[in-house]
Amino acid sequence: MGHVRDLPKSQLGVDADNDFEPKYITIRGKGDILKKLRKEAGDAATVYLATDPDREGEAISWHLLHSLNLDGKTYKRITFNEITKAAVKKSISEARDIDMKLVDSQQARRALDRIVGYKLSPLLWRKVRRRLSAGRVQSVTLRLICDREREIDAFEPVEYWTVDAQLLTKGKKAFSAHYGGELKTREEAEKITEDIKKSKAKVQEIKRGTRVRKPPAPFTTSTLQQEASKALNFAVSKTMLVAQQIYEGVDLKGLGTVGLVSYIRTDSARISDDAFAVAKTYITDNFGTDYAAQTKPEHKTRERIQDAHEAIRPTDITLTPDKLKDSLTRDQLRLYGLIWERFAASCMTAAAYDTVSIKISCGGHTLKSSGQIMTFEGYKKVYKKETDKDESALMPDMAEKDELKLETVTPLQHFTQPPPRFTEATLVRTLEENGVGRPSTYSPTITTLISRGYVTKEKNVLYPAELGEIVNDIMETHFGDVVDIEFTSKLEDGLDKIEFGEMYWKDLLREFYFPFNEKIAVAEQNIGEVDVKDEETDVVCEHCKRNMVIKYGRFGKFLACPGFPECKNALPYFPEAGVDCPLCDGKILIKNTKKGRKYFGCDNHPDCEFMSWQKPAGMNCPRCGEFLVEKNTKTQKRVMCLSGGCGYSDAVEDDESQD
């Protein structure tokens, strides 16, 4: 149910003239649930407050304490990281009082966010456009995206060269090697290539060794979001939605409703002793003693993490993904499988490899080659990512001073590349690394930036929109500290200090508010009105024949006539899929059914009735002539024919940006 009390939407709700006293009111729509809870609490000898085990949850319990009039009654605070019978019973045996340090930390965060949002947003409404917003974490995130775009625009590529060789051993086994030095020009590369071609190649040195690859840590919120984006192509918001579903519980045959994973908002990779003991037994029984870690793994974490909860893990490791395939939706099963595999891997032993590194002398130059072969799977028995598929490269047998035959020597030109634009996954990682926001804020922050029109998302890559750049310029010019990563990180540290009892929460508000309020007054005087042109489309208004423009409303983008208020025509906005309709000369649009399922339809509807659940590939089947659709698998992008009985399928080059 979330919060039952909050600051009022109609006013700031934080009284700076009265020592920042917050004004809390019952949230609209929560009256009925509070009435019911008051009756239940009135009949109970003891009330257990079992809200989420974090700052937010602690604050909700504190608000319930006041809303349910529990003063004078017996009440206890309990927390659990997994919704299982054992965990809930244990929490009741360890009941405690409400932790006011956690409550005050949340109060400070809420007040800070309200002050920033309610002071900056109206300023943007007056100077730029209605319905805009700014926020403590949101504005820093926008700056990161805009700064990256500036880096890309300013980037000047630098030329460099490599020299690659293909060689044969005495036993006619082929392998590749490369020149190890730095080459800046074509002339350097071609000279080395000619030197190598004119000379004999000989094995100069062979080094053999071993290496191990340690298992990964179990998921935190941010690492789950990152991995789900890369492995499952989930948006951050989708990851959290599905994770919440399997955390709250799923009906399992014979077991009833079971919470399948532990708490999903955490910045810690720690797991409990009990969880490790059960995992160790499971791994030993199913894979053997050699695969089970003998001691609980310890993982390095950033300083000042809250560490209030365990890592995200299955509540019962014996509930394997295979056992649950009939009880979960496809998305639930894929995400649960990712969590299960990662946790199981974290409790297993390292993977082991034999390595070989070879130096080859040729024409006064040194070529290098290396390879490795896995000798023990370890944790990769259950957790093998796509990027691991080529990590074992077996070198052919050879000995020092062996002569080798040169097959080809090729100089290759390259250019340095600009930093990549952010995906949702890499943006989350950057926010976490810089201490901006918390696990619970990443998803709503990114969603807000996209819905406000500050940022666009194309093929999983985030681009700043013109409106976003305008707002960011205003923020940087007039509120540089608010959008400064280091300053924002220090505010997060301040919230941590409150939680740890090292700072009084209103002291943090005092330090921030008064200088910030002065900057608001200066900005109000110095910022002129900014004219942001609406993006024009080729959709013609059926009433006044003007080209309609894209507007942003409370539910996202829509098309509106630029003649408003004389012409009030408005239409839903459907983004183009980037391909032509296979039935007519129209464009394919991305639409949604009434229930929210995505499909692809023609912009000439209803004259053209084309519709497909899969994206058309923009080409026809070479066998039957029907249109092909795109199909992304875990390993490649394919085009397929859906015509009955045809069965045509082929791999295609995937030019989409990767994380």
Image: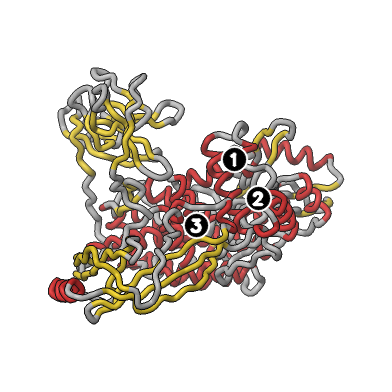
Query: Quick check: 310 above or below 513?
Result: above
Q: Residue at x 29, y 78 (%)?
A: 361
Q: Which quarter of the rendering shows the C terminus?
A: bottom left
Q: Is residue 64 left or right of residue 366?
A: right
Q: CA distance from mark 3 to mark 2?
A: 31 Å
Q: Secondary structure at mark 3?
A: helix
Say which mark, if any, is on residue 245. Answer: 1
The residue drawn where x is 76% and y is 50% is 87
State how far apart marks 2 and 1 are (Cα).
Answer: 12 Å
Q: Is residue 226 above or below residue 631?
A: below
Q: Earlier in the sequence, mark 3 or mark 2?
A: 3
Q: Which mark is residue 262?
A: 2
The residue wearing badge 3 is: 114
Residue 209 vertical placement versus 325 (above, below): below
- Where residue 536 sits in the image (x, y, percent)? 20, 40
Secondary structure beneath label 1 = helix
Q: Are marks 1 and 3 in contact (CB under 8 Å)?
A: no
Left or right: residue 119 compared with residue 108: left
